Image (cartoon, rainbow, N blue to C red):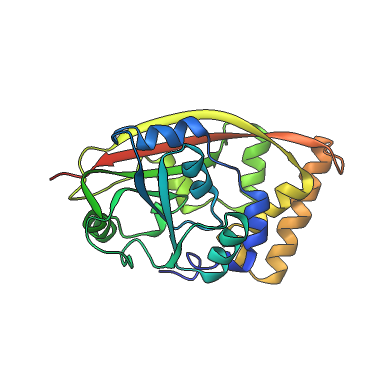
Amino acid sequence: MTQRATSFGAESGSYEKGRPEYPADAVAWLLEPLAKGTRAVVDIGAGTGKLTRAVLALGGTDVVAVDPDPQMLATLQENTPGVPVLEGTAEGLPLGDAVADAAVLGQAWHWVDPVRASREIGRVVRPGGVLGLIWNVRDDRVEWVRRLTAIMHGSAAEEMIAEDGVRVADPFGVLERWRGEWSRPMTREQLHAMARSRSYVITAAEEEKQRIAREMDALFDDLGLAEGRTIDLPYVTAAFRAVRGS
């Protein structure tokens, strides 16, 4: 994995504060092909546990959280006590064969080798199980959001979604798609936390971090976003699922 892929632990608090939750209907859609009853789900690249909590909220699921960064897993355990956590990656899962009904990845598939990860996840997921991928992406069709993205820089995830570049490989089948639009009220500080949680910013030189914060504040001043007030940040949630073959 790249330095940026494993950089998030340094800003785990900002990640938890600045990143949005996942819409419940999108997460339910990911797991819809599974039979009712208790389901074993692996959240890969679980980070601070945002997708872990969304899966648990559906009910009838046991979740194991996997992430390469121990700092992110420590934050997950603080916010979601009782969930088993393991250090690992999508290409190297510390789990046995055919132990899960589903594997889900939130804001993570763009960091992995899709062929190797599909094969390894296919080892862990039972035949008929599901691979679910989901991203919350800021809606750059809105002018002020485009300006914000230009200040912070775009991401590999945003490029992958925009270019319809999400791919999975054997043993998973056809990739189905789901899309939803919504918005999140955010304060100036939450927007700064969101920026600080991005891998480009985390790994940037201090001078670049200061430039980003300064230009974000100038944008917020233009928008009239006073301290303590909120602005609706529009999001598009892009979800994908594929069923494991026999």
Residue 202 percent location from the top left of the image: 61, 65
Asked whether residue 203 is in view, the answer is no
Q: Please give the name of the residue rendered at 60% of the width and 43% of the height, measured from the top-left corner.
A: 20
Q: Quadrant of residue 197?
A: bottom right
Image quadrant where one finds the C terminus? top left
Quarter where residue 200 is shown: bottom right
Q: In the image shown, does 74 or 133 lie closer to the viewer? A: 74
Q: Quadrant of residue 145?
A: top right
Residue sitting at the far left = 246
**x, y (%) of residue 144?**
68, 36
Q: How many marks?
A: 0
Q: Nearer the viewer, residue 209 or 246?
A: 246
Q: Is residue 154 visible?
A: yes
Q: Is residue 142 left or right of residue 70?
A: right
Asked if 238 appears above or below 197 in the picture, the reply is above
Q: Is residue 119 left or right of residue 138?
A: left
Q: Is residue 45 above or below residue 128?
A: below
**Left or right side of 57 for 122:** left
Q: Position of residue 147 (x, y in %)?
A: 66, 42
Please report the residue visible at 73 percent of the width from the left and 48 percent of the height from the top: 190
Q: Is residue 203 above or below residue 146?
A: below
Q: Give the residue at x 51% y 66%.
A: 4
Tell me the quadrant of the picture where the N terminus can be found. bottom left
Judge by depth and name the residue closer to the eye, 150 or 237.
Answer: 237
Residue 230: image x %, image y %? 78, 36
